[in-house]
Image (cartoon, rainbow, N blue to C red):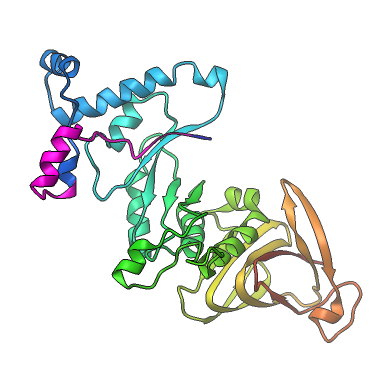
Amino acid sequence: MMQIENEVCLYMSHEQSEISYARQQPAMDFWTPRCYCDVCNALYQKEGGSEFEFGVRSLIKYLNSLLEGQKKIFPVLTYVNFPINPLRPGEDVEMYLEECHGVDFVAPDYYGFTPGDLAFAIQHFRRGRNIPFIAEHSTESVGDAAMNLYLSVCEHGVQGFSPWAINHAFGWRAWRDGVREKPFVDRNGEWSDAAVSYGRAQRAMNCASRQIAALAGTEDMMHYISYGDPRKIEERRWGIRWRLLTGKDGKCIVLRTGEDDFTILGVDTLVALSPVKYGKSMLIEEGRWNDEQWVCKRRISAAEVSEEKDIKGSDIGEIDLGKGTAYRIRLI
């Protein structure tokens, strides 16, 4: 896919902004509802209506003209993105979806603090032909990209997630305000703990991305996120008793990928599982899905998962999802 514009909005002219700056006006006053050049003034006198809507439509006309014939030349999805707090002149979700036919969807830039903030941002953009997508996610002190990746996909069906400033030490607001910082690059230029955590979370999810996309929001997927506090959870489902022991960064997804066939993935989680039905045993493999084909990295032997060394399988299993990986479990 291709980003067409980033935080598209209308700024004051240099002369106007200099006056606003001298008057110490709020930052919102540095944007303007529309362009006030002679051409736009003449068009506005002819069309009338709201200055805000005129400004948005001016940008939409520009984008529609820019993207005319794009799908025939370069057939990829296109999008624009902007934050919602606040929406600035030139940024209106409904008008873009209704009138900007050259753009496939409009996505939020998320710089919130809590799971509730994340839900609000996604819901605000969930309308009409739009698809759920996080175009930017904070990698500063306010961001927990690893957790919000799983929240966005598992609870909100988001189809894309992009952390911003992934390759430089963008933590100046955190350092200035003296709060706990989470930029992806430390001051010394090395990957931070936040970057490592996100990388592991993403690596695990990539092991079954197509399956997650197909099963998210259905009864064939369950997930758990620890929200910073270690937890012990037990779930009895699909003929298996699942026991999850998560660390403070624990995230786990379980997918029913077939009849008596399951995929489990995540980070910072220990899993103990056993069949509910008498006489059933399990085959457990570490690996990943390549589209619809399972690629086995290694088979977990019965000796590793059970005291009963049955070469056909085991009746109890223990799996460590510590650093981000995936396993396939089959009942036999």
Using residue 129 as the reference point, say whether residue 77 is left or right of it.
right
Tell me if residue 329 comes above or below residue 156 in the rendering. below
Q: Tell me the quarter of the picture where residue 39 sits.
A: top left
122 lies left or right of 90: right
Residue name at image x 47 percent, y 61 percent = 145
Residue placed most toward the observer, 273 or 166: 166
> Does residue 25 belong to the magenta stretch?
yes
Q: Nearer the viewer, residue 262 or 57?
A: 57
Whole-percent x, y for residue 118 in the image: 37, 57
Q: Nearer the viewer, residue 75 or 306?
A: 75
What residue sits 24% from the left and 48% below the top? 86
Residue ID at (74%, 46%) = 292
The number of discs equals: 0
Tell me if residue 38 comes above or below residue 189 in the rendering.
Answer: above
Toward which corner of the image does residue 278 lie, by quadrant? bottom right
Do we see residue 113 in this rendering? Answer: no
Which residue is most to the bottom?
307
Q: Is residue 289 magenta?
A: no
Q: Nearer the viewer, residue 256 or 34?
A: 34
Q: Position of residue 270 (x, y in %)?
A: 64, 78
Residue 262 lies, with reference to residue 157, above or below; the image says: below
**Apparent side of residue 143 relative to residue 304 in the rendered image (left or right):** left
Residue 88 x/y as whole percent: 23, 41
Q: Which residues are magenta?
A: 3-27
Residue 164 in view (yes/no): yes
